[in-house]
Image (cartoon, rainbow, N blue to C red):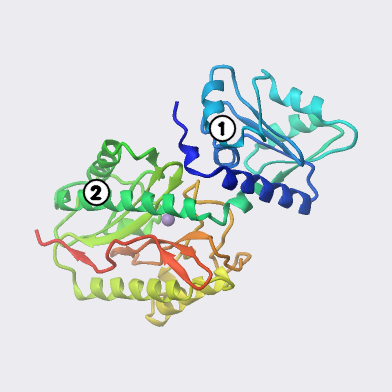
Amino acid sequence: MTSESLVFSAQEMTDRLARIRSAMAAGGLDAIVSSDAANAYYTTGFRGEPRTLLITADSLTLFTSFRTLPWAEAQTELLADHIELSTAPRPFDDIVKRLSGKTWNIGVDRSVSYASMLSWQELFSPHALRPCSIIEQVRRTKSPTEVAIMRQSQVINEAIFNAVLPQIRPGMTERGVQGLILAEMAANEDVDAYSFMPIVAVGPNAWEIHHLPDHTVIQENDMVLIDHGVFYRGYASDMTRTICLGTASEQMHDIYNTVGAAQDASIQAIRAGVSTRDIDRTARDVISTAGHGRSFTHGLGHSIGLETHDPGLNFNQGDEPTLLEPGMAFTVEPGIYLENGFGVRTEDVVIVTENGHTNLTSQTHALIERPV
Ligand SMILES: [Mn+2]
């Protein structure tokens, strides 16, 4: 029976609950019903299933099964005075019975399917259901303990990258390199899981941003884009480096350095109060000035935490910007992709601080050339 959530203090767990309740009140919600894994872990410390949470202004109930009850008790111990554990076999029927005295406004997970929503609306009538992201919003700003865990997640991920690096040779396929990465992850007992299937993209395959590694064979002097992350204690890491399996051409150095300059400039601009759109713009300007504006085809980064792509922050120019706050965690990953040539992306994970930022990634930004 593991209780990894106990690395957080009881104070931190009750603070999270208080922040969720105050956001509920501000959003006009009387309750949140959530079955989302990340939301349940964040709110209660429970990492098992089944799980359904009912959060109201003065109660917190975790519905699970009798089989998982001992784990639920251990993992939610820090909230023992604040949480009720229920093994009611039909949580939704039980929740409906608890809603009395008024018409309740209830927030449900944003990921709930349309079919579920229709049947729940019938079950919950006359109470009102609506999708909500309140717990996700609260999750956006990380505590010092969460930052320390995320740093360790990044340290583990870098160690995996550096263990794989000397094993990569021309003649291997993308899928073969992906296998080496997965093997290193599997062998590390601190790794919960990969945070997404590792991406290995040789030459022009990098044009496809989330390329699925295939049987493309690495040739000498190819640029190879490698992007992977792990979950450690529930928190995701994410890093991309592009290496050259041989000696890089002048053009490769040129593109690589432009991506690096864009990343440096945008990271330097990160501090509380600056908007996500401006951080993206800073990187985009560097790449456009170098003549590659049309080759940077995605947003600068994404929030990260209990999910690899945490909901919340948008860095695309067309999306609603957010003003950065201390504790926000996100990736900074500009890229240039030449349609019939090669692609370069460099990705770090950064935390916003009061006066600037902390880069959780320590892997070198210099181009790694591996003579073969
Ligand atoms: Mn990423």
Position of residue 115 relative to residue 94, above or below, is below
Residue flagged by tag 1: what amino acid is it? Glu
Residue marked by disc 1:
77
Q: Which of 22 and 180 is in front in this view?
A: 22
Pointer 2: what residue?
216
Q: Is mark 2 on a helix, strand or loop?
A: loop
Question: Which of these two is toward me, 105 or 258?
Answer: 105
Q: Image quadrant for the N terminus?
A: top left
Question: Can see residue 29?
Answer: yes
Q: How far is mark 2 from mark 1, CA to CA?
A: 50 Å
Mark 2 residue crowding within 10 angstroms, few (<14) / some (14–19) / many (20+): some
Question: Mark 2 and 1 residues: CB-CB less than 8 Å, in contact?
Answer: no
Residue 75 image point, x, y percent: 52, 32
289 left or right of 325 in image: left
Outermost residue, left side:
372
**Image coordinates for residue 245, horizontal then vertical, percent:** 17, 59
Q: Of 279 and 157, which appears nearest the observer? A: 157
Q: In this view, does 208 lie above or below 194?
A: below
Residue 186 location, quadrant: top left
Q: Residue at x 61, y 66 (%)?
A: 322
Ligand 1 shows up in the quarter that is bottom left
Image quarter of the C terminus: bottom left
SS of the residue under disc 1? helix
Residue 113 location (% of width, % of height): 65, 36
- Mark 2 or mark 1: name the one nearer the start of the chain: 1
Nearer the observer: mark 2 or 1; the answer is 1
Q: What residue type is labelled 2?
A: Thr
Q: Residue 53 carries which label?
A: none
